[in-house]
Image (cartoon, helix red, strand yellow):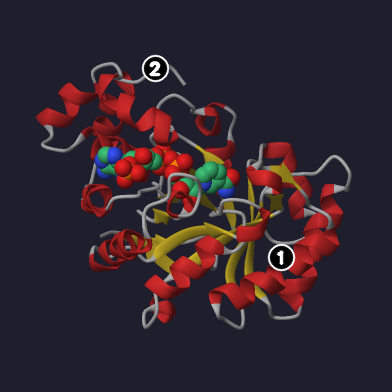
Amino acid sequence: MKMRRLGPDGPTVSVIGLGGMLLSITGRPPSDQAMRVIRMALDRGITLFDTSDAYCLDEHDMGHNEQVLARGLEGHRNRVTLVSTVGLRRPGGAWTVDSDPEYLTESVHRSLKNQAVECLDVVNLYSPDRRVPYEESLGALARLKEQGKIRYIGICNADLSLIRRAETVTPIQVIQNRWNPQHREIEREGVLAHCVETGKALMGYAPFGGTLGAPTLTTLGKLSDQARRRRLSPYQLVLSWMTNKAPVTFITPGARRPESVEDSSGAGSVDFDSDAVRAVENTLPAP
Ligand SMILES: NC(=O)c1ccc[n+]([C@@H]2O[C@H](COP(=O)([O-])OP(=O)(O)OC[C@H]3O[C@@H](n4cnc5c(N)ncnc54)[C@H](OP(=O)(O)O)[C@@H]3O)[C@@H](O)[C@H]2O)c1
């Protein structure tokens, strides 16, 4: 498993991580299966885990994913990094944005309890909230960082102008945006280039287009032919493309089955030169 630095001065973590969301939302596996998913990730050298207090069924279940990860990672917590997204609520199971400074502060304190740690590794703000200036939301996280409750701050779903606004408030370590063969905005709109230039980590989420996109990945263009030629699964091909596209990328596929994690982790040791990266891109829809 290849390792690299998560942001300009962050910890060194595996290029392939585990996205925790599917272990906790509707359709989640039984808890013994969730434990096997996490165990597989650890066994295969994964040290980067994506979580959120909002990965759960509804408002009564907040923190489910952090608790599941805390249990599955017991005894290994010192050698793994958790990236926790804040700024979401789950009323009746819906997803709603809340970046109110008070709510963010409460969320971070709850996450410390859920994860059973003194300081959260990385906290990402999910998105701006129309009701609150973005700078005030990030200011709340910056204060928590000063208080030693957060080590690094990142932002999700950010374009270049949002990144610039965030940076007026606090140093930004991680940008976490959607990135997959059918959604390549980060390449087209300069976010990936910005990360390369500044050393920020680019964490790509939904690399297969989510639970709906994943089964159709094999039908996409000539991706499967190319994967066969390289003796990789189509999923490994996509992940290898992303982790070799730039030296700042980290990909966190979600999984409910340990077999998925086993397969995806295999991409973490694949080296592609720029010709191989281009060859994969030639099989994909235009960015
Ligand atoms: N911060 C944010 O804004 C944000 C937003 C969305 C998601 N996320 C994070 O990003 C993670 C990834 O996104 P996602 O889970 O929505 O979608 P995804 O990773 O694109 O797709 C997940 C699906 O891919 C399947 N899969 C994974 N690896 C596979 C493999 N090697 N072979 C075959 N199938 C494979 C899984 O199957 P099985 O379930 O059958 O194992 C699952 O159905 C989430 O879990 C979450 O942690 C963050």
Q: Which amino acid, mark 2? A: Pro
Q: With 84 as the anchor, is 30 left or right in this view?
A: left
Above-or-below relation of 113 to 154: below
Q: Are marks 1 and 2 in contact (CB under 8 Å)?
A: no
Classify mark 2: helix, strand or loop.
Answer: loop
- Dot 1: element: helix
Q: Please state the horizontal and vertical placement of residue 110, each as a whole percent of the image.
A: 68, 71
Determine the residue positioned at 35% across, 53% down.
Answer: 16
Q: Nearer the viewer, residue 279 or 223?
A: 223
Rendered position, 109 above or below 134: below
Name the residue carrying label 2: 285
Q: Nearer the viewer, residue 107 or 122?
A: 107
Bin the neighbour count of mark 2 within 10 Å (Cα to Cα): few under 14, some 14-19, many 20 and up.
few
| Image position, residue 7 (x, y; %) | 53, 60
- x and y, in percent, of residue 70 in the image: 46, 73
Q: Nearer the viewer, residue 244 or 136?
A: 136
* Quadrant of res 235: top left
Where's residue 222, x and y in %?
A: 23, 18
Amino acid carrying label 1: it is: Ser
Q: Is residue 105 left or right of residue 258?
A: right
Dot in front, 1 or 2: 1
Q: Would you say the beta carbon of the disc 2 residue lies within 8 angstroms of ligand 1?
A: no
Q: Residues within 10 Å of mark 1 (few under 14, many from 20)?
A: many
Q: Which residue is label 1 attached to?
A: 107
Q: What residue is shown at x 51% (from left), y 69% (from top)?
A: 67
Give the CA separation, mark 1 to mark 2: 39 Å
Residue 112 seen = yes
